[in-house]
Image (cartoon, helix red, strand yellow):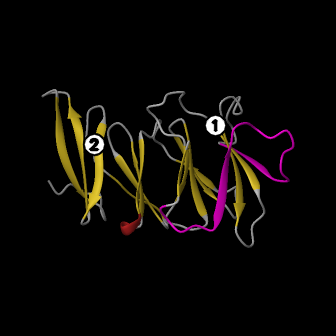
Amino acid sequence: MQQDPSFAHNWTAEILAARPLILPGRSFVYPAQADEVERGALEVLVRPVGNGMPFLATCALGFRDLAVPSGVWATPHPEWMCAVAGGYAYLINTIRPDEFTMLPYRPVMQVFPAPLDGLLLFASNRTILAWAKAGQAWESQRLSDEGLAMISVENGVLRGMGWEMRSDQEIPFALDVRTGLRVC
């Protein structure tokens, strides 16, 4: 399990090995309509700093595969956290935990903080989604037929490789990190 504090944040999070026998006063399940969410779920004890009450976040597991991430990431908004459980990503307001967004990627294959650009990046097998302080900033066009690799951000340019089925090769791509548009 990964914990990433790349952005300033107003909360602490403890990833628990199992659901506690005695639940805290507040607990939330993400997504609320999930069946058998506890089986393999990511259990996170969240403590907002200042004016929020602690709560247990139970995040439904996507996939039991080491190739997909699981853990907690800080986001560009200091009150929000990102919890990823087996590739299912949940952005949770730590002050009002009933407010959350589940990303559409199933699964998220990589989470990449870009704090200098104020973005948290999520890579699927084909596209990249950027999350900013105010929410989703952009989603890239299709960059790969099946799999993205070597994602890095430097001087405002997001670079990586995407596999192209027609040529059976890894093809480089470069995106403007502010807009998500291809620059080459």
Answer with left or right where residue 144 lies relative to residue 17: left
Q: Of label 2 and label 1, which has the lower sequence position?
A: 1
The part of the chain drawn in magenta is 6-30
Residue extending furthest bottom?
A: 50
Instruction: Name the spot of residue 141 as percent of width and height, x first.
Output: 28, 47
Answer with left or right where residue 44 lies relative to residue 172: right
- Which quadrant would the N terminus be assigned to in this image? top right
Which of the 4 image quadrants contains residue 86?
top right
The local secondary structure at tag 2 comes to: loop
**Mark 2 residue crowding within 10 angstroms, few (<14) / some (14–19) / many (20+):** few
Is 168 above or below relative to 162? above
Magenta region includes residue 182: no
Instruction: Name the spot of residue 94 as percent of width and height, x first.
Output: 67, 61
Which of the 4 image quadrants contains residue 108?
top left
Which residue is nearer to you in this view: 22 or 30?
Answer: 22
Answer with left or right where residue 39 lies relative to residue 62: right
Q: CA distance from mark 2 to mark 1?
A: 27 Å
Q: Which label lies toward us, 2 or 1?
A: 1
Residue 20: mark in rendering: none
Instruction: Name the spot of residue 95 as percent of width and height, x first.
Output: 69, 65
Q: Are marks 2 and 1 in contact (CB under 8 Å)?
A: no
Residue that numbered label 1 is attached to: 60
Residue that numbered label 2 is attached to: 142
Instruction: Name the spot of residue 139 as percent of width and height, x first.
Output: 36, 52
Residue under the image location 49 percent in, 28 percent down: 65
Residue under the image location 67 percent in, 51 percent down: 14
Residue under the image location 49 percent in, 67 percent down: 133
Amino acid type, mark 2 = Arg
Which residue is nearer to you in this view: 116 or 166?
Answer: 116
Amino acid type, mark 1 = Ala
